[in-house]
Each structure stands twice: as C-alpha cells, then as structure tokens.
C-alpha cells in the first residue's frame, strides 16, 4: 500500500508541475520568430491576408511573424506541413474554405482537416467573381451559360487549383445551370488571371481583390459574384442570383490554426491576440479591401464547428454534382 501512496503522490506532484509549466510557456511565448504558412501563390487573397494578419500579430506578440507560402493541391501541401510541425506555437497556418473542401473531394489525405489541428479563429468571409476577358462575346452570366449549353464541354474555366473553393464554385455553377465548363487548375490567382489575360483560358473564377483592378480598367469583364449579394469592391457586378442562377451562393472564408497538440494556453493566447488584431480599424479596412468581404473573428470552438459544417456541405455538393473523388 505504501508504494501506491508514493505513486499517487508522484502523479499529483507531476500534474501540479505541468499546469504551471504550460502557463509559463504561454507567458514567455513567443521568444523567437513565428512562421505563418498558407497554401496559395504569392499575390493572391490568402497571401495578402496572411501578410496583413502577420504584421498585426507581430506587433502584439513582439516577435516577427514570417509568412511562408507553400502553394499546391488546393492548400493541402501547406496543411500537411502545418499538421506535421512541432506543436509549440511557432508554426501557425492560414487556411481558406478549400481546407474543408479537401475532405469532400479527396479519398484520403495525409491529415484530418478537423482533428489534425487546433483552431484559433476565423478571419474573414468573402465571395468570388466569374470573369472573362473584355473581348469575350459573353456580356453577362446568362450569355455565358447560353454559350456553354450550345457547346457542352467546349468552354473551360480557370481556378486557383483543384479542390479549391474556386473550383467547387465552378462545379456547382455547372450543376445549377445545367452546363459543362471544364476545369483548368492553376497555382494561384495570379496565374489564373495571367492565363485569362493571355487568352489561355476563356473564363476564370477568381478572388475579387486580384480581378477588381482588371475589371475597373476594362481589361476584364466581371459577369457575376458568387455570393448571394453584391460586394462593395465590385458594386457594378451582379450576384449570380441576380444573373439568373437561383439559389447559388458560394462564399469562402479564412482562418488561423495550429498543429494538434499545441498547448491550450497557447491557443487561448493566440485567439485573444488575433481578436485584438481584427478589432483594429486599420486592419479591418485592409482585410475588407483585400477580399471584398466581411471581417469576422471567432472562438476556437466556433471555427471547429464551421470547418465541420463546411465539410458536410461540400461533401453533399460533390456527391450531387457527381464530381469524381481523387
């Protein structure tokens, strides 16, 4: 019995030591630069948001926050790197709606979109835009749909990558409008926009922040935004609903997460700091300008629920649209 008492005492002492250590870790964090990874090309919405948020976090944390892009596979390359990183708070990830789509479109992943991570907070929600070059014969989304119906499989659309929200927005448009636009994946918004301007692809579904200057200059024509209402960045571009595709509403989102196993005290610290950053009027204005959407933070639990709900939503879209899983 004595050995049991000694063992119980040792366990109690060890447990008592763990909690203060975690608190100290949170209090001392960070003592060196932090990496912020994202999975899309430089110059796109994810990259722009990452840099805005990284600057704000750096001010609050007192250490540099270095943005690192790992583009490819709809953000999965970066997500895999984040999931496998040491869970010490020195690797943070910015993910978009594509993170949840991956669970719907891939047969297997090297990580679990929910369980492999600790969620920090959402950042923003925003729609996308369907666009063509200025010399394209389609003057409206209705024109494009009519052309696509005349030549099934004869038109293609570019996106930021397979399995991205941009990709699934196009597939959902196919299903809702009864057309067959062929998907052409690129490695980010910049590449798909360059392809559109160069005539390599006739249609893109892109992020408003990158296409807005081209639309405003007249080089590109915005046919519709994918959200249910118009967006401030492109007030003259109708929603797909206005353009005749009833019930069509696609908005993506962005949020921060860390590898599974990151101490709860650090996640709480990062959540609090992130919400402070998002409450800054200058940061909010920069993010709203960057994505043409709504800035909205959350608790870790709320972000986890969002990701789970998005997985269910897009799994249903993939099944109904008969999109082959890879």
Image: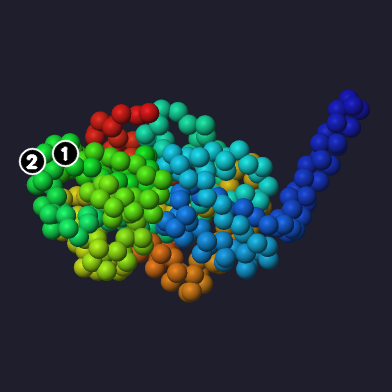
Above or below, 202 against 49 in this view is above
**Residue nearest the viewer, comparing 199 with 106:** 199
Above or below, 228 against 309 in this view is below
- Crowd tier of the residue under label 2, counting other residues whose Cα lies within 10 Å: few below 14, some 14–19, many 20 or above: few
Does residue 228 appear in the picture of this structure? no
**Residue nearest the viewer, comparing 25 with 5:** 25
| Residue that label 1 marks | 154
Quick check: 311 left or right of 77? Answer: left
Does residue 202 appear in the picture of this structure? yes
Residue occupying image coordinates x 26% and y 47%: 201
The image quadrant where one finds the C terminus is top left
Where residue 24 sits, quadrant-wise, is bottom right
**Residue nearest the viewer, comparing 240 with 153:** 153
Quick check: 42 left or right of 56? Answer: left
| Residue that label 2 marks | 150
**Residue nearest the viewer, comparing 58 with 296:** 58
The image quadrant where one finds the N terminus is top right
- Crowd tier of the residue under label 1, counting other residues whose Cα lies within 10 Å: few below 14, some 14–19, many 20 or above: few
Where residue 210 sits, quadrant-wise, is bottom left
Quick check: 216 left or right of 135? Answer: right
Percent across and percent down for residue 53 are 53, 62
């Amino acid at each position: 019995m004595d050995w049991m008492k000694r063992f119980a005492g040792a366990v109690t002492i060890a447990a008592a030591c763990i909690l203060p250590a975690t608190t100290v870790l949170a209090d001392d964090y960070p003592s060196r630069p932090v990496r912020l990874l994202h999975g899309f090309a430089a110059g796109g919405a994810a990259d722009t948001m990452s840099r805005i948020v990284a600057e704000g976090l750096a001010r609050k944390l007192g250490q540099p926050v270095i943005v690192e892009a790992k583009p490819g596979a709809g953000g999965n390359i970066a997500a895999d790197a984040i999931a496998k990183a040491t869970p010490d708070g020195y690797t943070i990830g910015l993910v978009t709606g594509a993170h949840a789509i991956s669970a719907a479109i891939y047969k297997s992943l090297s990580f679990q979109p929910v369980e492999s991570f600790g969620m920090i907070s959402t950042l923003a929600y925003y729609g996308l835009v369907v666009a063509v070059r200025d010399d394209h014969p389609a003057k409206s989304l209705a024109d494009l749909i009519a052309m696509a119906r005349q030549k099934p499989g004869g038109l293609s659309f570019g996106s930021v990558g397979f399995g991205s929200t941009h990709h699934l927005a196009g597939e959902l448009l196919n299903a809702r409008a009864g057309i067959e636009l062929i998907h052409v994946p690129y490695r980010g918004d910049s590449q798909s926009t360059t392809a559109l301007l160069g005539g390599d692809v006739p249609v893109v579904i892109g992020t408003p922040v990158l296409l807005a200057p081209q639309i405003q200059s007249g080089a590109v024509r915005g046919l519709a935004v994918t959200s249910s209402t118009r967006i401030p960045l492109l007030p003259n571009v109708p929603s797909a609903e206005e353009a005749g595709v009833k019930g069509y509403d696609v908005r993506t989102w962005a949020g921060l997460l860390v590898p599974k196993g990151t101490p709860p005290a650090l996640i709480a610290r990062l959540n609090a700091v992130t919400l402070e950053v998002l409450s800054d009027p200058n940061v909010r204005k920069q993010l709203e300008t960057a994505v043409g959407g709504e800035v909205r933070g959350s608790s870790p639990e709320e972000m986890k629920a969002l990701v789970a709900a998005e997985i269910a939503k897009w799994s249903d879209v993939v099944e109904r649209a008969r999109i082959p899983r890879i």
